[in-house]
Image (spheres, rainbow, N blue to C red):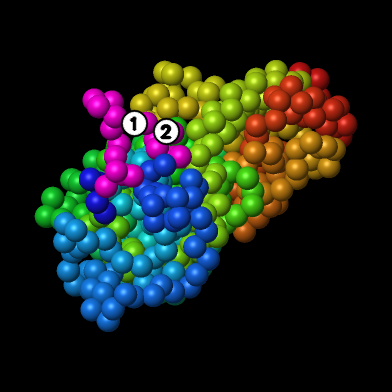
């Protein structure tokens, strides 16, 4: 990467440009694309070398045999390894988190599984926060153990182990390779203290053998939470959600310092979990409006959360903006998060029947899993996204049959509220007065 190239300038005079500004231009040289103002789609699997010597040099750089000299760019080879759409996406993605390097993947699960398989080997253990995304849960519980890699969960709900207990148990079994955190947790919005995990990891291995701290930042990132600033080593995304933002693509990301990203890049090339050029092109286009969308959705979510909190048929709203500042969760929120985001859950009075009655009467909000799109989405975690998790475990975590998760979009908030209101009016089964 050559920071001195004009299209990688991040300053005008003394002023350092903000990521939202750089989203329109950073990393793209129109001179390389017939002057096109926008990055074209490089829908190609492979790239022509000018000479055999050039092909050799590009492979040497791609395989890390040598670093590019001051005048060289790592050359384009093959779209599983690199592609202009992929590279510009990755360069822009790093700006929000202040990361040195970034990688884009074919899905959030591709990012998570490729990263875990890079850093965890047979016999290794790791600890992870709980609850986590359903796909991650399946990887941890059903796939990794077959490779001799076992996890220990920790959480903040009654009956869960603490981080320290999980670490002790994991280390008794084998080398602790990773602390994997999802915060806020899906769907409860439980927060994990990233800085505390990073401190513990550093105390464990001052000799460099310490576990990698990786954070799934899908719910609040890349705008409202910056795990690398809190001391995490790697930040992981489902780019399908807020970054893609239009519910029209599936992709993932992993960011961090180049020495930690390089092995993940190598594993991605081997597993073939790279994002394709068209998806990368869509993401680059989406990122121009990322801040606008996330800001608008976050504002709307507060109105929606307040409406739900005050509604007599709603028991409780798990919205980060309602955390009491004098609680441990409130303290973590204040120090770690820059905003409350726009995805949260609430418990309707009653159970599954009442929740289903409401869901089946939504008009504007779509009944669908996923989140972070321009449109409001609503779903039932216990029987949809988290249906793999045993019922007793769900109950412990606070994921009851009465829980509904909403991802608030960028519609007019009064329209979303009108929709929720009429759907709640249809809920009759077993409702008590508030
Ligand atoms: C959706 C999601 C994932 C998985 O991402 P995909 O793009 O669907 O593979 C991982 N973690 C979290 C928190 C998610 O919401």
Determine the residue positioned at 24% across, 51% down: 2
Residue 422 magenta = no
Determine the residue positioned at 40% across, 37% down: 22
Q: Secondary structure at mark 2?
A: helix
**On the image, numbered disc 2 is attached to which residue?**
21
Q: Quadrant of residue 272?
A: bottom left
**On the image, numbered disc 1 is attached to which residue?**
17
Q: Secondary structure at mark 1?
A: loop
Q: Position of residue 336 (x, y in %)?
A: 37, 31
**Residues shaded magenta:** 5-24
Q: Is residue 390 left or right of residue 82?
A: right
Residue 19 magenta = yes
Determine the residue positioned at 44% across, 33% down: 20
Residue 192 in view here: no
Judge whether 330 appears above or below 21 on screen.
above
Dot 2: within a 10 Å radius of its alpha carbon, few (fewer than 14), some, or many (20 or more) residues? few
Dot 1: within a 10 Å radius of its alpha carbon, few (fewer than 14), some, or many (20 or more) residues? few
Q: Nearer the viewer, residue 343 or 400?
A: 343
Q: Position of residue 321 (x, y in %)?
A: 53, 23
Q: Is residue 373 left or right of residue 89?
A: right
Q: Position of residue 203 (x, y in %)?
A: 18, 45
Q: Are marks 2 and 1 in contact (CB under 8 Å)?
A: yes
Q: Quadrant of residue 409?
A: top right
């Amino acid at each position: 990467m050559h920071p001195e190239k004009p299209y990688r300038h991040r300053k005008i005079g003394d002023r350092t440009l903000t990521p939202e500004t750089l989203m329109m231009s950073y990393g793209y040289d129109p001179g390389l694309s017939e002057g096109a103002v926008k990055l074209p789609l490089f829908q190609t699997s492979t790239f022509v070398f000018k000479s055999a010597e050039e092909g050799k040099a590009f492979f040497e750089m791609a395989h890390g045999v040598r670093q590019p000299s001051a005048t060289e760019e790592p050359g384009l080879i093959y779209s599983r390894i690199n592609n202009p759409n992929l590279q510009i996406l990755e360069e822009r993605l790093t700006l929000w988190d202040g990361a040195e390097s970034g990688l884009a993947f074919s899905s959030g699960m591709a990012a998570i599984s490729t990263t875990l398989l890079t850093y965890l080997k047979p016999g290794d253990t790791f600890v992870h926060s709980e609850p986590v995304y359903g796909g991650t849960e399946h990887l941890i519980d059903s796939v990794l153990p077959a490779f001799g890699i076992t996890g220990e969960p920790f959480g903040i709900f009654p009956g869960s182990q603490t981080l320290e207990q999980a670490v002790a148990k994991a280390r008794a079994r084998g080398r602790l390779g990773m602390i994997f955190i999802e915060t806020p947790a899906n769907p409860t919005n439980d927060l994990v203290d990233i800085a505390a995990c990073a401190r513990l990891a550093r105390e464990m291995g001052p000799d460099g053998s310490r576990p990698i701290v990786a954070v799934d930042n899908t719910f609040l990132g890349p705008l409202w939470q910056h795990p690398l600033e809190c001391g995490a080593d790697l930040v992981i995304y489902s780019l399908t959600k807020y970054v893609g933002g239009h519910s029209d693509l599936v992709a993932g990301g992993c960011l961090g310092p180049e020495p930690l990203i390089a092995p993940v890049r190598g594993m991605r090339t081997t597993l073939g979990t790279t994002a394709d050029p068209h998806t990368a092109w869509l993401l680059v286009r989406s990122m121009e409006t990322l801040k606008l969308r996330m800001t608008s959705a976050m504002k709307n979510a507060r109105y929606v959360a307040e409406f739900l909190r005050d509604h007599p048929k709603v028991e409780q709203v798990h919205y980060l903006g309602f955390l009491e500042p004098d609680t441990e969760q409130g303290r973590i929120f204040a120090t770690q998060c820059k905003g409350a985001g726009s995805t949260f859950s609430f418990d309707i009075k009653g159970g599954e029947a009442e929740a289903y009655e409401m869901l089946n009467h939504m008009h504007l909000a779509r009944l669908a899993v996923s989140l972070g799109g321009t449109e409001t989405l609503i779903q039932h975690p216990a029987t949809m996204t988290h249906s793999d998790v045993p019922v007793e475990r769900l109950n412990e975590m606070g994921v009851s049959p009465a829980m509904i998760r909403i991802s608030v979009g960028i519609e007019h908030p009064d329209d979303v509220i009108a929709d929720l209101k009429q759907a709640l009016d249809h809920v009759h089964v077993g409702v008590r007065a508030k």
